Amino acid sequence: GVTFARFLDALAGGTVALVVNALVLPADPVAMVRGALRPLAAELAATLDDVAHAILERDRDQAERAVLRARGIDELSSRLVDAVEVSRETTRYAPPRRRWRSRVERYADAATHSDLAVRNIRVLARGTIRAVRLDENVPPEVADAVRDLAAAVRAFPDAIEHLERVDRVRDSALRAAATATRVLEETGNLSVSVIVGQVRSTATDLLAGTGLGADRAADEVRRAVAEAVEA
């Protein structure tokens, strides 16, 4: 009374599905990673906007919301990691999609540095709420630096897709690092030191994620910081 008919049917159906997915209608790997990166960048930028507002208005509630928002970004970051993994497999096993492998790898590198940026922005948000709670002096120029960083984050997805737009990330990120450094030269309390450190680190991560690499990105930020101190 034992029959393998259903097993064979399932095996045949699964085989056909794999063939169709790999050869006939493979998923678009670039669209997958692009679609995962954009909402992550949008939420990161919105979190930075909340931080900047909290600094300017000395708004404790806004600072707390920014911290909660930063903590909630993990899900979007995980989606990007999953999208990179699936996209890599697609370019590896689906012949029609192999030509997109280099672009997918560009997004994979961006995902790695985006994850670092998420962690830095979370620390930045915690530093802000500490400053507001302790009523420490955080000059409005710090908020300007955070907003420049938000602009760099918003430009990040387009820079990954269109390499000729990298300067939009670079200019905003370096301006953020320079502005924050000038504030640190004048106001050296612990909260400002934490915020400025995270602004610089996030600027470095964004530049590295655009294809500069970690070493060159760090050099660019150090140069901007040195010029800000000299000025």
Image: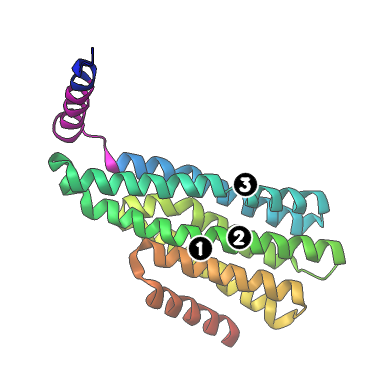
* Residue in the picture at 48% in, 76% down: 221
Q: Is residue 22 located in the magenta-colored stretch of the structure?
A: yes
Side (left or right) of 60 relative to 160: right
Three-letter amino acid code of the residue under disc 1: Leu
Note whether 127 is above or below 19 in the view shown. below
Measuring from the top left, give residue 33's x and y in whole percent.
36, 45
Front tag of 2 and 1: 1
Tell which circle, 3 or 2, labels the residue nearer the N-terminal end.
3
Three-letter amino acid code of the residue under disc 2: Ile
Tell which circle, 2 or 1, labels the residue nearer the N-terminal end.
1
Which residue in the structure is indicated by mark 1? 116
* Residue in the picture at 83% in, 70% down: 136
Q: Secondary structure at mark 1?
A: helix
Q: Is residue 141 located in the magenta-colored stretch of the structure?
A: no
Note whether 194 is above or below 7 in the view shown. below
Side (left or right) of 95 relative to 136: left
Which residue in the structure is indicated by mark 2? 121
Side (left or right) of 100 relative to 38: left
Q: Secondary structure at mark 3?
A: loop
Measuring from the top left, give residue 190's x and y in whole percent.
76, 76
Mark 1: few/some/many CA within 10 Å (<14, 14-19, 20+): some
Q: Which residues are magenta?
A: 10-29
Q: Looking at the rendering, in which quadrant would you find the C terminus?
A: bottom right
Decide: marks 3, 1 in contact (CB < 8 A)? Answer: no
Which residue in the structure is indicated by mark 3? 72
Mark 3: few/some/many CA within 10 Å (<14, 14-19, 20+): few
Gap in angstroms between the C-alphas marked 3 and 2: 12 Å
Three-letter amino acid code of the residue under disc 3: Gly
The answer to whether any part of residue 25 appears in the image is no
